[in-house]
Amino acid sequence: MVQIANYWTANSPLNVTLYTNCDEVALYLNDVLVSKEKPFVNGNRDALQHSPFVFKLDKFISGTLRAEGFIKGEKVISNVVKTPESPVKIKLSYDVSSKAINANSPDMVFVYAKITDLNGTFIPTAMNEVTFALSGENAALIGENPVKAEAEIAVIILKTKNLNSPITIKASGANLESATLKIN
């Protein structure tokens, strides 16, 4: 695995940290190699099985950071982070925590409205207000509504009595393409 720990926005740190279990990582900015490095090791980190990698960039340039992880010289994985553009859309999902909503008795799940740009890139600074609407029997929305997004996400709780009939949740916000989620 390789994970870039940076949103790559104008306010992001220029020291880009990556976490990985690979023995080498190459970092690219807009398809130009920044450098290929081994893990960063110092007195505080040398006891870690997998030390982080730190790449020092000179300045912020909007675009794409791509990390490629190598084991024994062979590329095995990559991760991409793109600079987000303006907020345009809402992406709706719900958290079942690896367990389906109980169809026959009451249940509660978190519903997430994530703010994205036109390309589907999440916007970590998004604080848009999102209004949730519910249609269908045997369910209710719990929580403040509308909800102001924090760190790209507006959250509300869906409480079901049962799922004998479909439920539809719609999320909308000013200047945002709305999203609909159907739960059967």
Image (cartoon, helix red, strand yellow):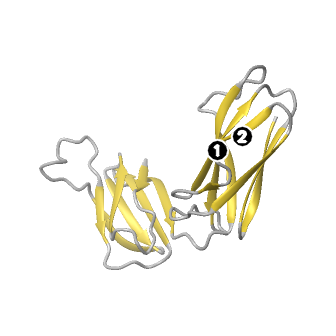
Say which quarter of the image contains residue 131: bottom right
At 19% from the left edge and 53% from the top edge, which residue is drawn?
A: 41
Q: Which of 8/102 is in front? A: 102
**Alpha carbon separation for disc pair 2 and 1:** 7 Å
Is 61 placed above or below 21 here? below
SS at mark 1 in the image: strand
Q: Residue 57 vs residue 45: left or right?
A: right
Query: Which image quarter holds the C terminus?
Result: top right
Is 14 placed above or below 71 here? below
- Residue 155 pos. (x, y %): 61, 47
Q: Residue 29 vs residue 97: left or right?
A: left
- Residue hosting label 2: 141
State which tag comes first along the sequence, 2 or 1: 2
- Residue 157 pos. (x, y %): 65, 39
Q: How many marks?
A: 2
Looking at numbered disc 2 in the image, what kind of residue is underneath it?
A: Leu
Q: Which of 161/17 is in front? A: 161
Residue most extreme to the top: 104
Residue most extreme to the left: 43
Q: Are marks 2 and 1 in contact (CB under 8 Å)?
A: yes
- Residue 70 pos. (x, y %): 38, 54
Is 70 placed above or below 134 here? below
- Residue hosting label 1: 156
SS at mark 2 in the image: strand
- Residue 104 pos. (x, y %): 78, 20
Residue most extreme to the front: 144
